[in-house]
Amino acid sequence: MNKIIFFLLLVIFISCKVKPEPLQYGIDACYACKMTLMDEKFGAEMVTRKGKIYKFDDVNCMLGVYHSDFESQQDIAHLLVVNFAKPTQFIDATNSWYLKSDSIRTPMASGIAAFATQEEYSPFKKKWKAILMSWGETNTQFK
Amino acid sequence: MKNVQFIFLIITLTFSAESLAGKIIRVGASEEVTRIKEAIALALPGDTVLVQPGVYREGNIIIQKSIALIGEGYPVLDGENKYEILTVHTTNAIIKGLRFIDTGIGSIEDKAAIKILDSKNIRVLNNQFENTFFGIYLANSSHIWIENNELKSDAEAEHQIGNGIHLWKCEHITINQNKVRGHRDGIYFEFVTNSLITNNHSEGNMRYGLHFMFSHNDEYRNNTFINNGAGVAVMYTKGVKMINNRFEHNWGSSAYGLLLKDIRDSFVSGNVFVENSVGIFMEGSSRNEFKENEFIKNGYAFKLQASCDDNVIERNNFQQNTFDLVTNGSLVLNRIESNYWDRYEGYDLNRDQVGDVPYRPISMYGMIVERMPTAVLLWRSFLVFLLDRAEKAIPVLTPENLKDNLPSMKAYDFN
């Protein structure tokens, strides 16, 4: 009996957890700019504690909504960005590396690409002569 | 002494005229020069490289001279699914009558059939493109003329294909009479100013038929946009003229005939919107004029978000649309006047062709569907009909001020 209750509780808790959803390129539209997502190297997603999912095509679109009063920042459960080096793969936005350069052509002209590790970003940093930024610095760019 | 000078002048002119005419270098299997690259290396500024019919597999060809590259009988330049075919970096050049096939596909690099970089005064005429990643790609260039090209691609996934005609940071460009099919965006403008897009046909592209971003003071006229994934998008731009275009059959959940976002001081006139999910969707836009457009058989003819102000919607025809106009707020800062609405049920006692009672284009149910999209299931049911009638008599949900005070009794004839 106990086992069953435990199992039920487990199921309930698992199903309560809010989970991000993969971006469907060519189908999903950016919440902020309404453009259909196309470029798999870019993209972002914001998930609230209640499980509402906002999808974006570029980091600046997400930051625009994130810094508006639209959703309180405490209510955000996940902030995710797409890893430039591994297209379509999400990484934690607050813990990523960002490169900014005019040679990066992003969907909404932010000029910012996100990376998970130093190994991933260093070849691109050289090639684009890009500036390296953290999440905090990236935020100040689009406040 | 004067005579001598004169004779000298004549001699100089004669010789210079001869050198200006340039020579013609023929390229072909049976010619002396068999490779295009070789011919370009031999050519001097002002020369013409005349390419004979045949298939040329030469990897990436680079033009850095003021020459004309002209094909006879559409010679094929094959990118073998690996290369960018033609890269141009010069002033005063012509590329004409060539057929480009199978460029490489790059996820990081934007490979194109013709890439024009930091150039000026280039003409790209009468070319054909098949299965190219990007068709014609322009960056940092000005005074370019793109005419009569035909671009066709049949990639299956959106991200495996680039834009048909792609412009980035350009000015004074003319794009006339091109046909674009099956690309990501048919024609793409980013930071392009003072340019003209006329008589093009953009059909069956994966995302937008035409896509404008941060491109001011451009004009597009007499273009046709049919069956594109999400219609046409004009964003973050001011001073655009959109005249006599046709937006047809752009169906889908996030598809619009014309998507306008953050547009200022623009002019939309003489356009026809037929069978789109949403004829025009406008958000965050100010001081635009919509005159003499026709909205026929759309799901929503006009979605006017409350974030828009000072826009004028005047003398348009609204016929056979499921919803004529919807908005998402009660504040109305736009002028809607003298339109023809086929749903208007008012009368005209003084016979001046202007209805005597105002028309409220927003149906209550349209407002409900705007808030709760799934409610559209009940549309056209008897209950909804009753609710709509009740709302017409005593407006509760619909914005009181949103009305056309001078509705036309007859459809305008714009032809």
Image (tube, helix red, strand yellow):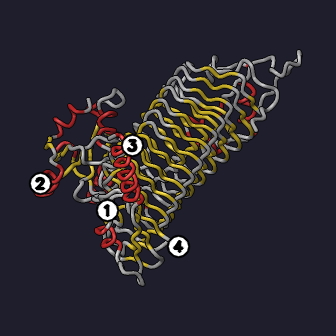
Instruction: Respond whether the residues carrying marks 4 and 3 are from the same subunit.
Output: yes
Q: Which chain's residue wears label 1? A: B
Mark 2 packing: few (<14 Cα in 10 Å), some, or many (20+)? some
Q: Which chain's residue wears label 2? A: A
Give amino acid for label 2.
Ser
- In the rendered image, which residue does mark 1 sit on? B44
- Image spot of residue A141 (x, y percent): 22, 33
- SS of the residue at dot 3? strand
Q: Which chain's residue wears label 3? A: B
Q: Viewer-proximal residue, B353 or B400?
A: B353
Of badges 4 and 1, nearer the viewer stands 1
- Image spot of residue B243 (x, y percent): 61, 37
Of badges 2 and 4, nearer the viewer stands 4
- SS of the residue at dot 1? loop
Q: Viewer-proximal residue, B306 or A141?
A: A141
Of badges 1 and 3, nearer the viewer stands 1
The reply to whether residue B115 is in sight is: no
Instruction: Respond whether the residues carrying marks 2 and 3 are from the same subunit.
Output: no
Give amino acid for label 1.
Leu
Instruction: Respond whether the residues carrying marks 1 and 2 are from the same subunit.
Output: no
- In the rendered image, which residue does mark 2 sit on? A122
Q: Residue at x 34, y 26 (%)?
A: A69
Give amino acid for label 4.
Gly
Marks 4 and 3 sit apart, C-alpha to C-alpha, by 34 Å
Mark 3 packing: few (<14 Cα in 10 Å), some, or many (20+)? many
| B35 sits left or right of A120 in the view | right
Instruction: Respond whether the residues carrying marks 2 and 4 are from the same subunit.
Output: no
- In the rendered image, which residue does mark 3 sit on? B190
Mark 1 packing: few (<14 Cα in 10 Å), some, or many (20+)? some
Give amino acid for label 3.
Glu
- In the rendered image, which residue does mark 4 sit on? B73
